[in-house]
Image (cartoon, rainbow, N blue to C red):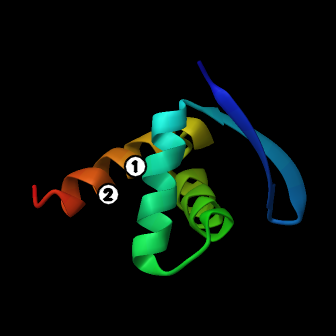
Amino acid sequence: MLEKRSLNLSGHRTSVALEPEFWAALEEAAAARGITLPALVAEQDAARAEAGAALASALRVYALRATRAAAGR
């Protein structure tokens, strides 16, 4: 089941729906970097806009990469 969260990105409110496991991975990645979850999402929003990817997809890929990096892969 998807969990929808509302965030303020670039001065406007947006909602993102992800599975709870992805939200947990993103929160862990943000904590490991010493930044807030909204800051991490804003960072990924800016990066994905250049590539033309959907925000939810970009966040899932980031969560996967962060989890793999933390596991030493």
Among all residues in the image, which is located at the extreme top? 1
Residue displayed at 74% across by 42% down: 5
User: Does residue 70 appear left or right of residue 34 in this picture?
Assistant: left
Q: Position of residue 67 (x, y in %)?
A: 28, 52
Mark 2, residue position: 66
Q: Position of residue 26 (x, y in %)?
A: 48, 54
Instruction: Note whether 32 is above or below 67 in the view shown.
Output: below
Label 1 crowd (10 A; few <14 / some 14-19 / many >=20): many
Q: Are marks 1 and 2 in contact (CB under 8 Å)?
A: yes
Q: Amino acid at mark 1?
A: Ala
Q: Which mark is residue 25?
A: none
Residue displayed at 61% across by 72% down: 36
Instruction: Note whether 3 is above or below 42 in the view shown.
Output: above
Q: Position of residue 51 (x, y in %)?
A: 50, 49
Badge 2 marks a residue whose secondary structure is helix
Mark 1, residue position: 63
Q: Could you tell me if residue 1 is visible in this image?
A: yes
Q: Amino acid at mark 2?
A: Ala
Residue displayed at 68% across by 64% down: 38
Among all residues in the image, which is located at the extreme right? 12
Q: Position of residue 11 (x, y in %)?
A: 88, 65
Badge 1 marks a residue whose secondary structure is helix
Residue closest to the eye, 14 or 35: 35
Label 2 crowd (10 A; few <14 / some 14-19 / many >=20): some
Residue closest to the eye, 70 or 44: 70
The image quarter in which residue 10 lies: bottom right
Q: Could you tell me if residue 54 is visible in this image?
A: no
Q: Quadrant of the N terminus?
A: top right
